[in-house]
């Protein structure tokens, strides 16, 4: 009887501790989610134009898997070009460094295996824009940062979108971040009050198909909302990358964002 009572007492104590610290369960879920993201990764085959020794050093230091022109027998590449496998984040780093490239194909990488381009088609179009202007996020009101895209061909429509955003804020668990089209016909939740009392957001959401069929050339808006008084912050920087035509037939796992229509009816966005 004593043994049964002791087991029950230990179980009760553990349950009380865990219920009092929901973060324990959340961390286990976060680890599982992180693991699922690592297992399948979007990968891009880039043809990179190397103009200077500095650019070549940058590419090599990034650790990209590359086939370098002049080093491979029967290569069609010039001495200053390379075909490399890169993630979306690495592609953004190349853009920030001012290195020119073209996207040849898109595929997937499962765990640490070699990229698989068999399911992908050649991509014919991608446009990119950024905004580094700071926009203060008010208490219980929406603010937005706009990026106007004009360089896609006339009539081009969205296949999918990648978005990176950085928000400086003292309590990110109070924030909602949305991506919308120009006339607010479609609203997509990128950040949904996650993160608790942590500071700042710096994240990339890939392969958003929610805006399929929308015109590429328009003003896209990143919105911020702060639900609670007592903390401050602003949209610091974001970029949008819009792919059009020839959508690859890929197996891509969904990331943290989900399709979401805001329910804050009393505080509507104004285009």
Image (cartoon, rainbow, N blue to C red):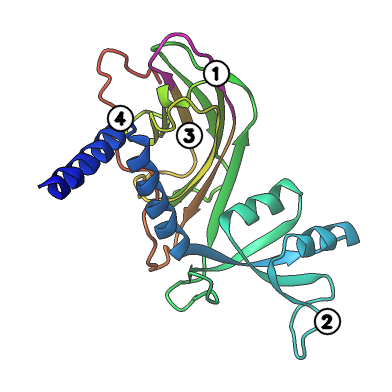
- Dot 4 falls on a residue whose secondary structure is helix
Q: Residue at x 83, y 63 (%)?
A: 56
229 in magenta: yes
Q: In the image, which is nearer the foreground, mark 1 or mark 2?
A: 1
Dot 1, how many residues are within 10 Å of its Cα: few (below 14), some (14-19), or many (20+)?
many
Image quarter of residue 268: top left
* Cα separation between marks 3 and 4: 42 Å
Mark toward the start of the polypeptide (2 vs 3): 2
Residue 202, how many percent across, how many down? 56, 37
Q: Which residues are magenta?
A: 225-236
Mark toward the start of the polypeptide (1 vs 4): 4
- Dot 3 falls on a residue whose secondary structure is strand
* Cα separation between marks 1 and 2: 50 Å
Q: Residue at x 52, y 76 (%)?
A: 113
- Residue assigned mark 3: 220
* Cα separation between marks 3 and 1: 21 Å
Q: In the image, which is nearer the foreground, mark 2 or mark 3?
A: 2
In the drawing, what numbered circle is on residue 233?
A: 1
Q: Residue furthest left?
A: 1
Residue 73, how many percent across, how many down? 77, 90
In the drawing, what numbered circle is on residue 20?
A: 4
Report the front residue among 225 and 149: 225
Q: In the image, which is nearer the foreground, mark 1 or mark 4?
A: 4
129 in magenta: no
């Amino acid at each position: 009887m004593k043994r049964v009572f002791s087991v029950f007492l230990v179980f009760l104590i553990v349950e009380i501790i865990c219920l009092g610290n929901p973060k324990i369960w959340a961390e286990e879920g976060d680890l599982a989610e992180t693991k699922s993201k690592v297992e399948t990764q979007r990968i891009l085959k880039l043809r990179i134009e190397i103009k200077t020794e500095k650019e070549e050093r940058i590419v090599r230091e990034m650790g990209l898997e590359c086939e370098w022109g002049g080093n491979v027998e029967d290569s069609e590449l010039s001495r200053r070009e390379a075909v490399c496998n890169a993630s979306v984040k690495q592609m953004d780093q190349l853009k920030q460094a001012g290195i020119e490239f073209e996207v040849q194909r898109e595929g997937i990488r499962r765990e640490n295996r070699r990229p698989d381009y068999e399911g992908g088609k050649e991509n014919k179009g991608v446009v990119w824009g950024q905004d580094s202007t700071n926009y203060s996020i008010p208490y219980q009101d929406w603010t937005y940062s706009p990026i106007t895209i004009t360089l896609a061909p006339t009539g081009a429509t969205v296949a999918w979108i990648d978005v990176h955003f950085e928000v400086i804020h003292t309590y990110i668990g109070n924030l909602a971040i949305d991506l919308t089209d120009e006339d607010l016909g479609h609203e997509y939740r990128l950040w949904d009050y996650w993160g608790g009392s942590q500071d700042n957001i710096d994240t990339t959401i890939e392969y958003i198909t929610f805006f399929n069929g929308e015109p590429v050339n328009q003003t896209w808006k990143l919105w911020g909302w702060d639900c609670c008084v007592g903390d401050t912050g602003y949209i610091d920087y974001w970029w949008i990358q819009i792919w059009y035509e020839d959508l690859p037939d890929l197996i891509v796992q969904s990331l943290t964002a989900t399709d979401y229509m805001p329910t804050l009816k009393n505080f509507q966005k104004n285009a």
